[in-house]
Image (spheres, rainbow, N blue to C red):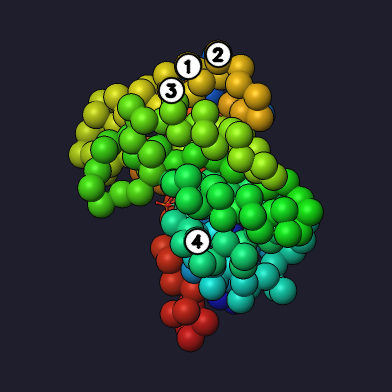
């Protein structure tokens, strides 16, 4: 009964979000197919994750190493996995080889650690660079004005490949302020793409969450990361007790 309710509410959320993504994509001269909807699955049960994949979610993202590992055996292999949270260098060995993309590379030191572990496993790991677009003390990520020089350095590191940029803009009360940050991110994305650097392809611009994904898409986001709006409020543990 509980599971049926969760699934039904997922269906409703998913179809509403798909419609809104389509409209926002059209406003930026694109279509639904140009946008990736990543399911941000923190605290979501493996059952509901698997149901969402059955219904069409192709990419999921975890932001906690421990949770990703503990759910791994129960989550379908039939889905692309991203790591989207802050990654400590001492946890790199637990993540490299486990996910298809690490979205939240926020320092050269972390890029080097990912490289080292990738070489050990004889693989290349794809990454995004996280940009602290609002220059907030509390947030990690590269400062926008230092992004270019850091990209040049990271692009020379072996066994990793830069696929794009990711950002979590400051929490804003009004959408016009958000828009400024998203547009600034899009400009950085375009500027870097135009440089055509070796080992750097600007394919993914990951920005936009439950509260601001439509604005993000209108400003050029290629991937939105949605948790609460898609899966419901975060209550994996409490749901189990109902
Ligand atoms: C949780 C999370 C999201 C999704 O947030 P919602 O507001 O629930 O949509 C997106 N990105 C990251 C990095 C997250 O940790």
Which residue is depicted at the point 33% across and 27% down?
Answer: 145
Which residue is depicted at the point 60% across and 53% down?
Answer: 114
Task: Give the residue pinned by disc 4.
Answer: 89
Element under label 4?
A: helix
Element under label 1?
A: helix
Element under label 3?
A: helix
Mark 4 / mark 3, whichever is N-terminal = 4
Q: Label 2 vs label 1: CA separation?
A: 5 Å
Q: Quadrant of residue 48?
A: bottom right
Q: Position of residue 18 (x, y in %)?
A: 57, 38
Element under label 2?
A: helix
Q: Label 2 vs label 3: CA separation?
A: 10 Å
Q: Is residue 52 above or below residue 177?
A: below
Q: Are marks 3 and 1 in contact (CB under 8 Å)?
A: yes
* Mark 2 crowd level (few <14, some 14–19, many ≥20, 10 Å Cα): few
The disc placed on residue 188 is 3
Mark 4 / mark 2, whichever is N-terminal = 4
Residue 87 left/right relative to 122: left
Q: Label 4 vs label 1: CA separation?
A: 29 Å
Q: Mark 4 or 3, which is nearer the eye?
A: 4
* Mark 3 crowd level (few <14, some 14–19, many ≥20, 10 Å Cα): some
Task: Give the residue pinned by disc 2.
Answer: 194
Q: Are marks 4 and 2 in contact (CB under 8 Å)?
A: no
Task: Give the residue pinned by disc 1.
Answer: 191
Which residue is depicted at the point 56% across and 50% down?
Answer: 112
Q: Mark 4 or 2, which is nearer the eye?
A: 4
């Amino acid at each position: 009964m509980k599971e049926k309710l969760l699934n039904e509410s997922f269906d409703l959320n998913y179809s509403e979000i798909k419609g809104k993504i389509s409209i926002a994509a059209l406003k930026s001269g694109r279509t639904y197919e140009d946008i990736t909807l990543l399911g941000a699955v923190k605290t979501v049960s493996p059952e509901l994750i698997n149901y969402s994949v059955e219904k069409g979610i192709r990419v999921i993202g975890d932001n906690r190493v421990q949770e990703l590992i503990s759910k791994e055996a129960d989550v379908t292999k039939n889905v692309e996995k991203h790591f989207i949270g802050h990654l400590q260098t001492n946890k790199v060995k637990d993540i490299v080889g486990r996910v298809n993309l690490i979205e939240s590379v926020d320092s050269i030191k972390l890029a080097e650690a990912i490289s080292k572990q990738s070489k050990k496993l004889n693989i290349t790991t794809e990454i995004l660079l996280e940009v602290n677009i609002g220059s907030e003390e509390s947030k990690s990520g590269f400062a926008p004005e230092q992004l270019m020089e850091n990209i040049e350095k990271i692009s020379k590191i072996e066994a990793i490949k830069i696929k794009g940029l990711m950002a979590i803009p400051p929490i804003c009360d009004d959408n016009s302020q958000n828009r400024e940050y998203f547009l600034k991110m899009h400009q950085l994305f375009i500027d870097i793409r135009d440089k055509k650097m070796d080992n750097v392809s600007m394919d993914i611009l990951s920005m936009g969450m439950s509260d601001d994904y439509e604005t993000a898409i209108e400003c050029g986001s290629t991937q939105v990361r949605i948790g609460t709006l898609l899966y419901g409020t975060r209550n994996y543990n409490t749901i189990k007790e109902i």
